[in-house]
Amino acid sequence: MMLDRFRLDDRVAIVTGAGRGIGAAVAAGLAEAGADVVAGARSADQLAETAAAVEAHGRRAATVAGDLSTRDGMQSLVDTAIAEFGRVDIVVNNVGGAMPSAFLDTSERSFDTAMRFNVTSAFNLTQLAVPHLLESDGASVVNIASSAGQFAIRGMSAYGTAKAALIHLTRELAQDLSPKVRVNAVSPGAIATSALDIVLQTPELHDAMLDGTPMRRLGDPDDIAAAVLFLASPAASYVTGEVLAVNGGIQGSNLELGLPDL
């Protein structure tokens, strides 16, 4: 049956940034489709909630709390997957983020941090997982990019550039790892998470974002989880090197932070 192509029974997925928001929704969504999940994030308390959501779907969960901006942190995720479950079939590179700021207020350190957190982290985990992914009969990597990496937005020189680099890394890895491992990205628009709350600090910014979105609403983390499930599953077995936009129909920036001209 067609719906069977979305099943992930007995697959093992690693999901980074899985303590809350998009990452937690992805972990639960993959578990609902049949996958066991290794969830990584900084907060052990948040990861416990994610593990409970995975187990509520009858699947097994393992958690790794620590700094995922380092290669050693990513190695611990792979090691845990092999030790607990004996395999890796799916990698979801969700960890990332950076605060917006005016260009002249963006330090070299914050720019470098954005690149490491959003791009190098995905490079590291994917590279470390590949030897195990090659043993899978349906391996998939899904990177969580952003519309900020596709549309220029004032104040996003660090974050937007990093996400654009992640999108290109997705396309490069799709070439490097084919035909054994598929690599795709999801590009979310404005998703209702605590991270977005930090940016939308006034009702005016919130309303302006809705007005600039054809669907007239913020996205839900489950909207992204559903897209990840498609790309990670056999339903997308002929899809690689693609960027799936889940953004409410925007064709450009729907976020204006009110930063003045120089």
Image: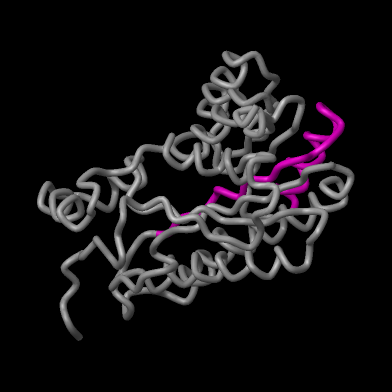
Q: Left of 153 or right of it: where is 22?
A: right
- Residue at image position (53%, 52%) is 144
Which of these two is toward me, 98 or 145? 145
Q: Left of 97 or right of it: where is 130?
A: right
Which corner quadrant holds the C terminus?
bottom left
In the picture as drawn, the residue positioned furthest to the bottom comes out as: 262
Which of these two is toward me, 76 or 22? 22
Residue 98, horizontal then vertical, whole percent: 42, 59
Q: Is residue 47 magenta?
A: no
Residue 221, horizontal then vertical, whole percent: 41, 37
In the picture as drawn, the residue positioned furthest to the left comes out as: 204
| Whether residue 192 is situated above or below residue 53 in the rendered picture | below
Q: Left of 43 or right of it: where is 12?
A: right
| Whether residue 46 is situated above or below residue 185 in the rendered picture | above
- Residue at image position (58%, 41%) is 230
| Whether residue 192 is situated above or below residue 48 in the rendered picture | below
- Residue at image position (16%, 77%) is 260
Residue 143, horizontal then vertical, whole percent: 59, 54
Magenta stretch bounds: 72-98
Which of these two is toward me, 226 or 254? 226
- Residue at image position (20%, 54%) is 209
